[in-house]
């Protein structure tokens, strides 16, 4: 039998039905779902060895090989040339996506400094949510003693809906800790 993450099982068994009733859909296929999670890290051009360390750390905390990002144009003030490696990214889908999301919600975010919840105003108007993290060392997979540089990351949650309100309901029921989630309702069940 194939392994299915707990958060995926929770979505399939409970969250779909709750969202179907809450959003008044007739068909289960209309219910919003999480399509992918994209993690981006900008490294810069000061030291070229940082890109390799960053790619290694990102691969370690996601469980999937990361790729580097290239600059798209020349900027003479920054000594940046087109095609220079300036960051790395990884796209998570299916089971790996749900495993990463569960670790982010239950372990990494509570470990961040002075954490009170995530902002509600980071939706892009098309049903996607962007979360910025200042320190990558909040993930337990990263060995703090081997870290040469602390960097931030952008995590984008891409959903199947076009509306921010529906995406917000989905992310609340998946367990993302928004600051004022009482406005839209609490998740009344545990993972």
Image (spheres, grey):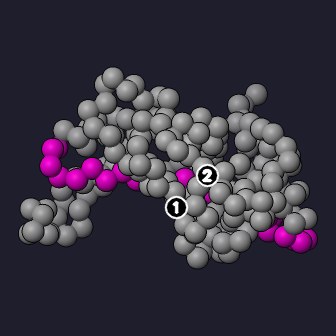
102 vs 191, left or right, is left
Q: Looking at the figure, which quarter contains the C terminus? A: top right
Give the residue number, with chain letter if any, for mark 2: 117
Name the spot of residue 36 as percent of width and height, x first.
58, 55
Asked if the stretch drawn in magenta spans residue 29, the answer is: yes
23 vs 38, left or right, is right
Q: CB atoms at circles 2 and 1 under 8 Å apart?
A: no
Q: Secondary structure at mark 1?
A: strand
Name the spot of residue 152 as percent of width and height, x first.
38, 48
Q: Residue 51 or 186: which is nearer the viewer?
A: 186
Q: Residue at x 42, y 29 (%)?
A: 142
Asked if the stretch drawn in magenta spans residue 47, the answer is: yes
Cα distance between the residues tagged 2 and 1: 14 Å
Q: Residue at x 73, y 43 (%)?
A: 8
- The residue stretch that appears in magenta: 23-48
Q: Looking at the figure, which quarter contains the N terminus? A: top right
Q: Residue at x 52, y 61 (%)?
A: 130
State which quadrant residue 82 falls in: bottom left
Give the residue number, with chain letter if any, for mark 1: 130
Q: Earlier in the sequence, mark 2 or mark 1?
A: 2
């Amino acid at each position: 039998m194939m392994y299915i993450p707990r958060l995926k099982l929770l979505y399939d068994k409970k969250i779909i039905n709750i969202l179907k009733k809450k959003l008044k859909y007739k068909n289960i296929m209309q219910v919003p779902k999480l399509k992918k999670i994209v993690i981006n890290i900008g490294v810069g051009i000061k030291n070229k060895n940082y890109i390799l360390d960053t790619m290694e750390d990102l691969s370690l905390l996601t469980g999937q090989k990361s790729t580097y990002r290239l600059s798209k144009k020349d900027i003479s003030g920054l000594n940046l040339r087109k095609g220079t490696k300036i960051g790395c990214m990884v796209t998570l889908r299916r089971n790996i996506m749900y495993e990463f999301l569960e670790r982010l919600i239950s372990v990494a975010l509570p470990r961040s400094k002075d954490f009170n919840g995530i902002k509600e105003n980071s939706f892009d108007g098309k049903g996607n949510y962007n979360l910025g993290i200042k320190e990558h060392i909040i993930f337990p997979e990263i060995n703090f003693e081997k870290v040469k540089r602390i960097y931030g990351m952008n995590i984008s949650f891409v959903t199947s809906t076009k509306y921010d309100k529906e995406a917000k309901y989905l992310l609340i029921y998946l367990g993302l800790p928004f600051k004022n989630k009482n406005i839209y309702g609490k998740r009344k069940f545990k993972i």
